[in-house]
Amino acid sequence: MFKFIGKKKSVILVSAVIFVAIVAVISFRLYPIAFVGWQPVIYGNFSKNYDAEIFYSTKFLSTYNKSNADIINSLEIRNEIKRDRLEALIEDILISNQLKVIFSNSELDSQINKNVSAVIEGKDIKKEIEALYNLSVSEFTKYFLEPQARREILEARMRMENINFNEWLASEKKVAKVMIFLPGFEWRGGTVIVRK
């Protein structure tokens, strides 16, 4: 059934497969812009977070502060939003890692679903999310509600054990091995810094 295709044809085939894979990674923005330990922060996730925050901030300023609405276009403000979104994704990885130590995957998924459902259950928020963030409900859930749920779950657990969540997070960030590949940003002293 299968014939030997020869070295030349197999090299062409392997090259084509590699090319298609590279194009897919770039097209779907699946490449890492940072690593927390060995866990990647994927550009596509960062980009969705950043774009939603820019969209929301633009809407907010044009509604409530029209005289300063152009401030969102400044490089300094955009870099601060990038810095904030990147740091939030790094924190979410640290929080997720700690939750995996405490809970089984099924327990954690159940608790996250419970927290998310408490926010959106019975509400028709599709139009509001699209209008304010330019995201679908599932995207908003993935990029904003689930990370918030993870944070709340860990905060509640630590509160039960008399552990200060903010102190724990600051300590974890200081010892975290983080490499950032996003141009203009670096990890220093447990935080994302915008290089001048």
Image (cartoon, rainbow, N blue to C red):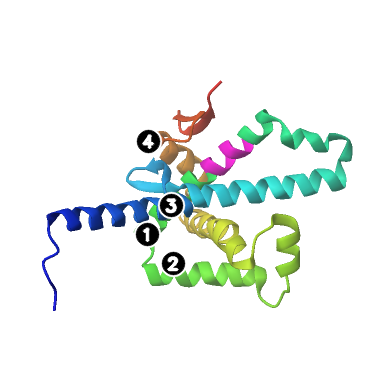
The residue sitting at 36% across, 56% down in the picture is: 20
User: Dot 4: within a 10 Å radius of its alpha carbon, few (fewer than 14), some, or many (20 or more) residues?
Assistant: few
Viewer-nearest of discs 3 and 4: 3
Label 2: which residue?
108
Residue found 79% across the figure and 47% down from its top: 60
Local crowd size for mark 1, using a 10 Å CA cut-off: few (<14), some (14–19), many (≥20):
few
Q: Earlier in the sequence, mark 2 or mark 4?
A: 2
Left/right of residue 23 with respect to residue 165 in the rendered view: left
Residue 30, numbered circle = 3
**Badge 1 amino acid:** Lys
In front: label 2 or label 3: 3
First reached walking from the N terminus: tag 2 or tag 3: 3
Residue 81 sits inside the magenta stretch:
yes
**Mark 2 neighbour class, 10 Å CA radius: few under 14, some 14 to 19, many 20 or more:** some
CB within 8 Å, label 2 to label 4: no
Q: Residues within 10 Å of mark 3 (few under 14, many from 20)?
A: some
The residue under the point 74% across, 37% down is: 72
Dot 1 corresponds to which residue? 100
**Gap between marks 4 and 1, in whole Å?**
18 Å
Rendered residue at 49%/33% (across/down): 191
Q: Which image quarter: residue 175?
A: top left
Q: Which residues are magenta?
A: 80-87
| Circle 4 residue | 175
